[in-house]
Image (cartoon, rainbow, N blue to C red):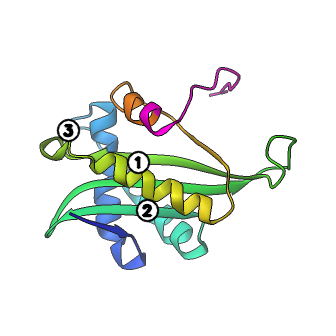
Amino acid sequence: MEYKIATLKDIDLLTVSRIEVLRAANKLDDSVDMSEVEAASREYYKKALADGTHTAVLVMDGDSFVGAGGVSYYEIMPTYHNPSGKKAYIMNMYTNPAYRRQGIAFKTLDTLVKNAKSRGITHITLEATDMGRPLYEKYGFTSMDAEMELL
């Protein structure tokens, strides 16, 4: 397996893999139109990879895409628990079903966490699916009961 940090040259694969991840996570079949999300994802990657606010990992088995993960970086006002105000949000974690249970997701997650920590970021969050929760707990992530969301 090759774990590679994506560059702007990987925009097409990143965009295709993002749609694959979203279809899998949301249980969407091919009849669901994802063209708007695909176009927006392509633009997001172009901007965020260029300005360093996102790191993406692509996992390849030869020429075949088998997994991915990403981390977005942002900054908030400094707090007592996070004096730098720098934060990272892990997303887009995916492993092709034929490659699961081989440590691919763990190594991808580890790569993303180490990348964030190399930037001095100590506050790293993510949203876990039921399937992903055991991996994140094994890595050391804990549930946050105080966080809320407004949709």
Q: CA distance from mark 1 to mark 2?
A: 9 Å
Q: Earlier in the sequence, mark 1 or mark 2?
A: 2
On the image, the x and y values in percent for residue 64 come to 15, 63
Please state, as top left, top right, bottom left or bottom right, where the N terminus lies in the image. Answer: bottom left
Labels 1 and 2 touching (C-beta < 8 A): yes
SS for callout 1: strand
Q: Quadrant of residue 12?
A: bottom left
Q: Earlier in the sequence, mark 3 or mark 1?
A: 3
Residue 39 % position (x, y): 40, 59
Q: Where in the figure is residue 27, as x and y percent of width and height?
A: 27, 30
Label 2: state its secondary structure. strand
Q: Quadrant of the C terminus?
A: top right
Q: Which residue is mark 3?
A: 31
Q: Give the Cα distance between marks 2 and 3.
A: 27 Å
146 relative to 40 in the view: left or right: right
State whether the magenta stretch is mostly helix, strand or loop.
loop
The residue shown at (55%, 66%) is 48
- Magenta stretch bounds: 137-151
Lateral position of residue 15 relative to residue 1, left or right: right
Q: Is residue 90 above or below residue 54?
A: above
Viewed as shown, does residue 16 lie left or right of 64? right
Q: Residues within 10 Å of mark 1 (few under 14, many from 20)?
A: many
Q: Which disc number belongs to residue 123?
A: none
As displayed, is residue 96 above or below residue 146?
A: below
For residue 56, the mark is 2
Residue at the spot of label 1:
92
Name which residue lies at 13% across and 69% down: 62
Say which amino acid is labelled 3: Ser
Q: Nearer the viewer, residue 131 or 150?
A: 131
Tell which tag, 2 or 3, sits nearer the viewer. 2
The crowd level at tag 2 (other Cα within 10 Å; few <14, some 14-19, many 20+) is many
